[in-house]
Amino acid sequence: MTPALIVIALWVVLAFVMAAFPSTDNHWRRAYILIAIGLPLLVWVTWQAGPWAGTLALAVGGLVLRWPLFYLWRWLRGVR
């Protein structure tokens, strides 16, 4: 297992630990932090482990951050 895949697995663990604690802003601040950390990790995984691992890491990130993706999709379509 490459170091990039280990770090992505730790990112997923961090996401679940962050979600376990209550938040006053419905976890949006934490989602922004996870996105800021996850995007460079996604590039690193794709570069080090190949496009299939990068696609898998993107899918895992989409599952973890499903609500920000849902609101991004609605914003891109113009639905309020």
Image (cartoon, helix red, strand yellow):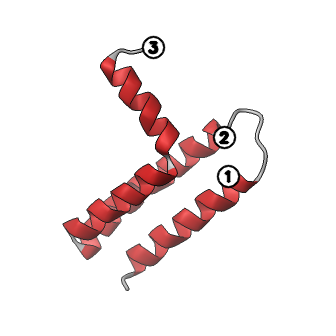
* Circle 2 crowding by C-alpha within 10 Å: few under 14, some 14–19, many from 20: few
Q: Earlier in the sequence, mark 3 or mark 1?
A: 1
**Residue at position x 46%, y 29% in the image:** 71
In the image, farthest residue toward the bottom: 1
Q: Secondary structure at mark 2?
A: loop
Q: CA distance from mark 3 to mark 1?
A: 26 Å
Within 10 angstroms of label 1, few (less than 14), some, or many (20 or more) residues?
Answer: some
Between discs 3 and 2, the one toward the N terminus: 2
User: Which residue matches tag 3?
Assistant: 80
* Cβ atoms under marks 2 and 1 closer than 8 Å: yes
Q: Secondary structure at mark 3?
A: loop
Name which residue type carries label 3.
Arg
What numbered label is drawn on residue 27?
Answer: 2
- Name the residue located 63 percent from the left edge and 45 percent from the top edge: 30
Nearer-the-camera pick, 40 or 69: 69
Residue under numbered circle 1: 19
> Considering only order in the chain, which callout, 1 or 2, is on the residue closer to the N terminus?
1
Q: Is residue 53 above or below residue 78?
A: below
- As helix, strand or loop, the secondary structure at mark 1 comes to helix
